[in-house]
Image (cartoon, helix red, strand yellow):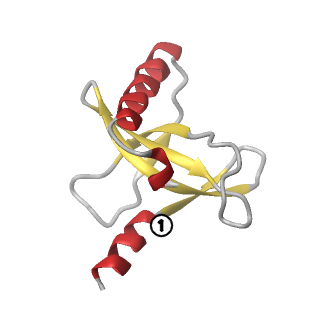
Amino acid sequence: MAKDNYEAEEEMTVTLDLDDGSTVTCSIVTILTVEDKEYIVLLPLNENGENEDGEVWFYRYSENPDDPNEEPELGYIDDDEEYEKVADAFDEFLDNSEFDELV
Protein backbone atom coordinates (compact mmCIF):
# COMPACT_ATOMS: atom_id res chain seq x y z
CA MET A 1 0.00 0.00 0.00
CA ALA A 2 2.78 2.43 0.82
CA LYS A 3 4.25 1.82 -2.62
CA ASP A 4 0.98 2.91 -4.26
CA ASN A 5 1.05 6.16 -2.30
CA TYR A 6 4.65 6.75 -3.34
CA GLU A 7 3.78 6.14 -6.99
CA ALA A 8 0.82 8.51 -6.72
CA GLU A 9 3.18 11.23 -5.50
CA GLU A 10 5.55 10.55 -8.38
CA GLU A 11 2.71 10.96 -10.86
CA MET A 12 1.54 14.42 -9.76
CA THR A 13 0.71 16.44 -12.85
CA VAL A 14 -0.55 19.87 -13.82
CA THR A 15 -2.24 20.94 -17.05
CA LEU A 16 -1.09 24.25 -18.55
CA ASP A 17 -2.97 26.43 -21.01
CA LEU A 18 -0.40 27.70 -23.51
CA ASP A 19 -0.48 31.06 -25.29
CA ASP A 20 -1.40 29.39 -28.59
CA GLY A 21 -4.62 28.00 -27.07
CA SER A 22 -3.33 24.44 -26.69
CA THR A 23 -2.88 22.60 -23.41
CA VAL A 24 -0.03 20.41 -22.20
CA THR A 25 0.13 18.08 -19.23
CA CYS A 26 3.33 18.27 -17.20
CA SER A 27 4.72 16.09 -14.46
CA ILE A 28 5.75 18.06 -11.38
CA VAL A 29 9.45 17.40 -10.82
CA THR A 30 10.01 19.57 -7.75
CA ILE A 31 9.44 22.94 -6.16
CA LEU A 32 12.62 24.92 -5.49
CA THR A 33 13.21 27.89 -3.20
CA VAL A 34 15.66 30.42 -4.60
CA GLU A 35 16.30 33.69 -2.75
CA ASP A 36 13.08 33.32 -0.72
CA LYS A 37 10.95 32.78 -3.86
CA GLU A 38 9.42 29.48 -4.92
CA TYR A 39 9.71 28.00 -8.40
CA ILE A 40 8.12 24.89 -9.85
CA VAL A 41 9.96 22.58 -12.25
CA LEU A 42 7.70 20.88 -14.80
CA LEU A 43 8.42 18.06 -17.23
CA PRO A 44 6.14 18.41 -20.30
CA LEU A 45 4.54 15.13 -21.38
CA ASN A 46 3.27 14.06 -24.79
CA GLU A 47 -0.13 12.43 -25.37
CA ASN A 48 1.34 9.09 -24.22
CA GLY A 49 2.41 10.56 -20.88
CA GLU A 50 6.09 10.51 -21.82
CA ASN A 51 8.84 13.10 -22.19
CA GLU A 52 11.10 12.46 -25.13
CA ASP A 53 13.82 15.12 -24.79
CA GLY A 54 14.27 15.68 -21.04
CA GLU A 55 13.42 19.38 -21.40
CA VAL A 56 12.00 20.95 -18.24
CA TRP A 57 10.14 24.22 -17.74
CA PHE A 58 10.63 26.65 -14.85
CA TYR A 59 7.85 28.89 -13.52
CA ARG A 60 7.44 31.14 -10.51
CA TYR A 61 5.17 29.38 -8.04
CA SER A 62 2.98 30.80 -5.30
CA GLU A 63 0.21 29.54 -3.08
CA ASN A 64 -2.34 31.50 -1.09
CA PRO A 65 -1.32 30.94 2.55
CA ASP A 66 -4.85 31.86 3.67
CA ASP A 67 -6.56 29.27 1.45
CA PRO A 68 -4.64 26.00 0.91
CA ASN A 69 -7.43 24.75 -1.38
CA GLU A 70 -6.95 27.59 -3.85
CA GLU A 71 -5.13 26.73 -7.08
CA PRO A 72 -1.44 27.74 -6.96
CA GLU A 73 -0.38 30.49 -9.36
CA LEU A 74 2.37 30.02 -11.94
CA GLY A 75 4.21 32.94 -13.50
CA TYR A 76 6.71 33.35 -16.31
CA ILE A 77 10.34 34.03 -15.52
CA ASP A 78 11.25 36.77 -17.97
CA ASP A 79 14.50 37.94 -16.35
CA ASP A 80 17.59 36.10 -17.64
CA GLU A 81 19.49 36.49 -14.36
CA GLU A 82 16.55 35.11 -12.35
CA TYR A 83 16.18 32.21 -14.82
CA GLU A 84 19.89 31.35 -14.49
CA LYS A 85 19.61 31.26 -10.70
CA VAL A 86 16.68 28.84 -10.93
CA ALA A 87 18.49 26.71 -13.52
CA ASP A 88 21.55 26.55 -11.24
CA ALA A 89 19.36 25.53 -8.29
CA PHE A 90 17.79 22.81 -10.44
CA ASP A 91 21.24 21.56 -11.48
CA GLU A 92 22.13 21.32 -7.80
CA PHE A 93 18.87 19.45 -7.17
CA LEU A 94 19.79 17.00 -9.94
CA ASP A 95 23.25 16.53 -8.47
CA ASN A 96 21.57 15.42 -5.24
CA SER A 97 19.13 13.00 -6.86
CA GLU A 98 18.83 10.58 -9.72
CA PHE A 99 16.92 12.31 -12.55
CA ASP A 100 16.03 8.93 -14.08
CA GLU A 101 14.17 8.05 -10.90
CA LEU A 102 12.06 11.21 -11.24
CA VAL A 103 10.95 10.60 -14.82
Q: Residue furthest top?
A: 81
Q: Is the N terminus in the top left, top right, bottom left or bottom right quadrant? A: bottom left
Q: Is residue 19 left or right of residue 27?
A: right
Q: Is residue 11 left or right of residue 1?
A: right
Q: Nearer the viewer, residue 36 or 32?
A: 32
Q: Position of residue 12 (x, y in %)?
A: 45, 64
Does residue 91 sit above or below 13 in this rendering?
A: above
Residue type of the residue flagged with mark 1: Glu
Q: Which residue is mark 1?
A: 11
- Residue 24 rendering spot, x and y as whole percentages: 67, 56
On the picture, is 45 further left or further right than 88?
Answer: right
Residue reaching furthest to the left: 66
Q: Residues within 10 Å of mark 1 (few under 14, many from 20)?
A: some
Q: Residue at x 62, y 43 (%)?
A: 54
Which of these two is toward me, 34 or 23? 34
Q: Residue 5 falls in which quadrant of the image? A: bottom left
Q: Residue at x 27, y 24 (%)?
A: 35
> Residue 51: x, y in percent?
66, 53
Instruction: Give the total number of marks visible in the rendering.
Output: 1
Foreground residue among 36 and 43: 43
Residue in the picture at 29% in, 52% down: 64
Secondary structure category for the residue under label 1: loop
Quarter of the image where one finds residue 48? bottom right
Where in the figure is residue 102, as x and y percent of width and height? 46, 53
- Residue at horizontal 40 percent and vertical 54 percent from the top: 72
Using the rendered view, name the quadrant where residue 39 is placed: top left
> Relative to 26, is 88 above or below?
above
